[in-house]
Amino acid sequence: MHRHLRSYCLLMPTPLLDIRGLTCEVAHHRILDRLDLTVQAGEIHALLGANGSGKTTLAYLLMGCDGYQASAGQVLFRGADLLALPLHERARLGLTLAWQEPARFEGITVREYVSLGHRQQNPEPALRQVGLDPERYLARRVDKGLSGGERHRIELAAVLSMKPKLAILDEPTAGIDMLSIGHIIDIIRALKRAGGSVLLITHQEDVALIADRASQLCAGRIIYSGSPREAVAHFRGRNCVRCDGEICGYVRP
Amino acid sequence: MSDLETLRHTLPMVGTEPSILDDTGIAHVVAHGHRILSRRTVPGLRVELEETPDALIGQLTVEAGATIAQPVHLCFGLTDPTGVQQITIDVQLQEGAQARILSHCLFPVAQAAQHRMQAVMTIGPGASLTYTEGHYHGLHGGMQVLPHATITVGQGARYFSDFSLLSGSVGHLDIDYRVDVEEDGLAELSAKILAHKTDRITLKEAVVLRGERARSLIRSRVVLEDEARAEITGITEAHAAGARGHVDCMEVVQGRAQASAIPIVKVCHPGAKVTHEAAIGSVDKQALETLMARGLSPEQAVELIVSGILR
């Protein structure tokens, strides 16, 4: 499998994101274990794995969130040493993260939030793209008054509006009703059309299948990289025993 | 510049245009210390004020059934670095009356000054009062402000208050408001304060829900920087069936500032309910990181979060 991965990578141009040997411990527990992963420019890359496999830790570590530091390894993003940069400089380099459970902001309007960092930009197209009527939402506050699904969509509108080089989306369809998942898929594709890449963390098979490539994370390591269909088919219905003895399932059909 | 002109020019510090004092359709009182500098009234509003050496004493009455279309501006202050201003005022909204009062307390050059207010407000049955209080205490931190008020909200009446002190120094602020709410009455008390350096804040707001279906909300937002200190007490007592109260206190602490929140809830009837939430801490980490993940610097992110909380 590793030989397959290496030969595949040899055919690819210089990756947008190049992770080598990334190791991370949180509270003396190894979450990421010599992880290798590449994401190409303009690629939607699905990251699959059971709960606790390290997906969100990888997202937080790449973004530079407080409390997540690599103990070994290297991450190059657009050729820059990502791990040496503070969070906001990683963002200014074109990396962003949409949290699985987005934060709430008392007093801040949707208009302000979606326009963050580029106030001249009209936030309305991004809102329409996520299926929200600007007239109804622009003046609303990004606070507890929004439902989980609305908050998710506004988060994605903010990401769209930022036009990132690489957006890490941590389970963007969590809490979204079935009818609206199509909207989220459209947004992910829109990010790609705008010239960006997406590292898409998901448990949902139909969402994973929109990716160009998929990688499977297990116990902190990438154990498979390839086409999403193969990745999903290969692991569908199987269990594996992790190195720590826990049984993990894979993608949900 | 005259005292009146100085106070006029300070009005923008509390978000008010000086030109409102020229509008003949808008009632106002401007007082420097215990001296009235300007006053105007409108139909339906009676203002009786007496200048004494020790206090400005008066009564403001909105007649029964009257609706005062434009806000009434009360502009109190001192234009000297030192001095004392004592306001003793009785505000009465008679049955069915409606009014908004904007109280501007302006002390632009205070270094060792004191402002005391003793207010009694009576909101008659079915009446509605919105009382917005904006303070500016200058930059020196030498102001001592003690607004104390007792408010009665009559049957089916509504009382909304909004205290804000968002620019300059606070100095020493000691707010003590008590509100009694009768049957079907509503009281909402909001306070927003930004404090820094060695500012000291004591904020005590108490609501007693006496009547059936009386409702209340106490909401305070305090942001403390440097070595500022704050003690926030929100008290709600419910004594009748269907009474509902909520206390919502948030204090954001930065630097070496310290804050405490004391929510006191007392329910004396099985059909009443009072809830409270209090949060004290630094700026929410995920909120901060989310804004930084959009490219804002840590300083820009904190500023945006704090400005949102204080809106």
Image: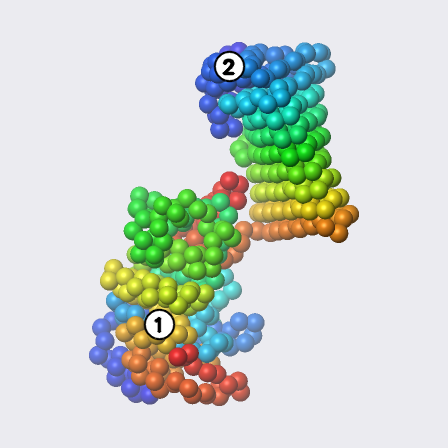
Q: Nearer the viewer, residue A53 or B168?
A: A53
Residue ID at (71%, 49%): B272
Dot 2 crowding, Cα within 10 Å, few <14, some 14–19, many 20+: few
Q: Nearer the viewer, residue B116 or B141?
A: B116
Give SS at disc 2: helix
Label 1 in the same subunit as label 2: no
Give the quarter of the image for residue B157: top right
* Residue B263 vertical position relative to residue B186 in the rendered view, above or below: below
Dot 1 crowding, Cα within 10 Å, few <14, some 14–19, many 20+: many
Residue ID at (49%, 66%): A68
For residue A207, the mark is 1
Residue A94 percent across, percent down from the top left:
32, 59
Image position of B309 (left or right of A110): right
Give the quarter of the image for residue A251: bottom left
Q: Which residue is mark 2?
A: B5
* Residue B39 vertical position relative to residue A17 in the rendered view, above or below: above
Amino acid type indicated by mark 2 = Glu
Image marks 1 and 2: residues in contact by CB distance under 8 Å: no
Residue A27, visible in the rendered structure = yes
Residue ID at (63%, 38%): B186
Q: Quadrant of the C terminus of chain A?
A: bottom left
Residue ID at (46%, 83%): A249
Amino acid type indicated by mark 1 = Val
What chain is tagged by disc 2?
B
Q: CA distance from mark 1 to mark 2?
A: 66 Å
Residue A209 percent across, percent down from the top left:
31, 75
